[in-house]
Image: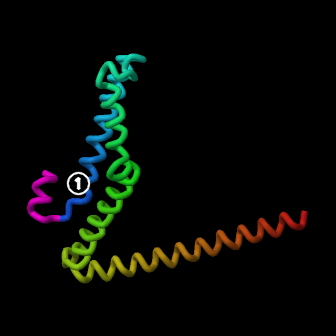
Amino acid sequence: MTARQVDVGKDSRRMVSEAKKTSTEMLWSVVNDCMQIMGGIGYTNVYPVERFLRDARLQMIWTGTNEVMNLLIQHEYYKELLARRKTRATSSWMPPTRRVKKRRFMSKLLLLAKRERGKIFLRMQKVASSWGNE
C-alpha cells in the first residue's frame, strides 16, 4: 500500500513513518526475545544474534528515532483531519437555516462559558482575599 502511494506520487510521509516504526519495533522485539533465549552466549561472536541485536537497534535510530516517527505520524494525521474538516465546512451538507442556528447556539455557549469563567475568577479572588484576612 505504501509503495503504491509513493509510485502514484501521493503524499505518503505518514504511511512510510508508520511502516518504519512498526517494522523496527517488531524486529527489536523478535531479536530481543532471541537474545533472552540464547542467554549470555548470545552476546558473543559465536552466534549471529549479537550482530542482529546491534543492527536492530541501529535501524530504530538511523533514519529517525521511533519517538520522532510518532511525532511525524501525529502531525501528518492532524493535517489530514484538518483538510477533511475544511472540505466538510465548505460543502453545503447542512441547510443554511440550520447553520445559522448552530452559529447562534455556539456563540451563546461561548458567552455562557465566558460568564462562568468570570464568576469562577471572582470566587477565586474572594477566597484569596479571605486568606489574607485570617
Answer left or right for 134 relative to 113.
right
- Tag 1 residue: 15
Q: Is residue 61 left or right of residue 11?
A: right
Is 3 colored magenta in this rendering?
yes
Q: Which residues are magenta?
A: 1-10
Q: Is residue 69 above or below residue 90?
A: above
Residue under the point 26% across and 65% down: 80
Dividing the picture into quadrants, the one containing residue 105 is bottom left
Query: In screen coordinates, is 86 left or right of 33?
Result: left
Prevailing SS of the magenta stretch: helix
Task: Name the colouring of the figure.
Answer: rainbow
Location of residue 104 by image quarter: bottom left
Give the x, y percent position of residue 70. Answer: 36, 52
Where 111 falls versus 49 (above or below)?
Answer: below
Q: Position of residue 96 (x, y in %)?
A: 24, 83
In this view, the residue in front, 94 or 41, is: 41
Residue name at image x 27 percent, y 47 percent:
20
Estimate how packed mark 1 is, as few (under 14), some (14 to 19) or many (20 or more) residues with alpha carbons within 10 Å: some
- Residue sitting farthest toward the front: 45
**Mark 1 residue element:** helix
Q: Quadrant of the C terminus?
A: bottom right
Residue at 36% of width from left, 34% of height from top? 54
Q: Amino acid at mark 1?
A: Met
